[in-house]
Image: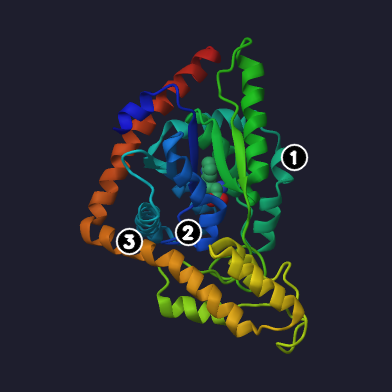
Amino acid sequence: MADKIADNKKLKRLMTGDRPTHNTYSIAHYIGSLKSRIINQDKYDTFVFIADYHALTTHADKTSLISSNTVGMIRTMLSLGLDPKKVVLYRQSRIVETFRLHTILSMLTAMPELERQPMLKEKIASGYKLTYGLMGYPVLMASDILIMDADLVPVGKDNEAHIEITKDLARRFNSMYGHGEDVLVVPEGEIGEIVIGLDGQGKAGKSTGGIFFDDSTEEVKKKVMSMYTDPTRLKATDPGHVDGNPVFIYHDLFNTNTDEVKDLKDRYVKGTVGDVEVKQKLLSAIEQFMEPIRQKRSEIDKNMTDDDIFDLLRQGEEIANNSAEKTINRVMKAMDF
Ligand code: TRP
């Protein structure tokens, strides 16, 4: 089935993935990124990978977690509706041609291009060592994308600059070695929104407060009921602010009852509804969203062993490696190697 898709030249290719830093995803990540790959799996030849080597930029001392996180993330994606018969799933580390392309592209990358990356500055500010690998993160990401001839790359806003570098490198390679032809496909990015954490800050991660797909009903309740709201509002009768208020941001994203959301917002602004009611309704909405996903997950966990998950990855890696080999052959030929 997946072979048919890999050979189907008519479909454009979508390629994306994540670093295996957790064993599941947050529901905010679903909005900003996972949703797109699931909606698009019928429309695109979809390649989804686990960026395990990229995880080393921050997790070099925690490598024992990488394979269990990989399995957990795949299980979560399957429970969200990603269909392994349609989507090619694979691990970055198994696609060796990526690293050959990475070496070539690194020779075409000027240091200042890397030095001005916003993500780099952020990582250094949060205490990570500036390694050669962290510096080269965008070049490796460009290699992941370009080796697969991706047309569309859905990523979060924090990766937007990396997509720009990827396009620049593809164009640069083509103009240096293409003799008028596009050897590397210049991809388009699809930039997803970053959903703030429950505490109203940063992106929703483990530290800034996020709801994760493996959270129990009890845990979700605790998190929602202690969410940040409007700091200027001291009593339920004070007029409140809706814009930028995490509780309403999450209502807009997860509450399908738009009349209810509108009513809550109207009353909040007037000061005729308390935080507790707003949060309880949000809790029901999030639970409604999560419950079928939890059920699907428990089915998957019953029916699929970790070995089955690795089998899926190995099947995907065969297809992905085939595709990567074709790209590297074009690259070597264009360079007269
Ligand atoms: N940088 C992505 C993240 O923040 C992971 C990633 C690595 C990626 N290579 C990629 C995403 C290629 C899309 C395409 O999680």
- Badges 3 and 2: C-beta atoms under 8 Å apart? no
Hey, which quadrant is residue 185 in on the image? top right
First in sequence: mark 2 vs mark 1: 2
Pick the front one: 13 or 174: 13
Q: Residues within 10 Å of mark 3 (few under 14, many from 20)?
A: many
Disc 2: which residue: 21
The secondary structure type at the circle numbered 1 is: helix
The furthest residue to the top: 179
Inter-mark Cα distance, 3 to 2: 20 Å
Q: Residues within 10 Å of mark 1 (few under 14, many from 20)?
A: few
- What amino acid is found at the position of numbered circle 2 in the picture? Thr
The residue under the point 56% across, 23% down is 184
The secondary structure type at the circle numbered 2 is: loop
Given this view, does label 1 or label 3 mark the residue nearer the observer? 3
Q: Position of residue 177 (x, y in %)?
A: 61, 15
The residue under the point 42% across, 72% down is 215
- Badges 1 and 3: C-beta atoms under 8 Å apart? no
Say if 47 sits above or below 258 in the image. Answer: above
Disc 1: which residue: 112
Pick the front one: 141 or 135: 141
Q: Position of residue 210 (x, y in %)?
A: 54, 69
- What amino acid is found at the position of numbered circle 1 in the picture? Pro
Say if 89 sits above or below 198 in the image. Answer: above
Disc 3: which residue: 297
Q: Quadrant of the N terminus?
A: top left
**Is any atom of residue 280 visible in this view?**
yes
Q: Position of residue 250 (x, y in %)?
A: 59, 67
Q: Position of residue 82 (x, y in %)?
A: 38, 48
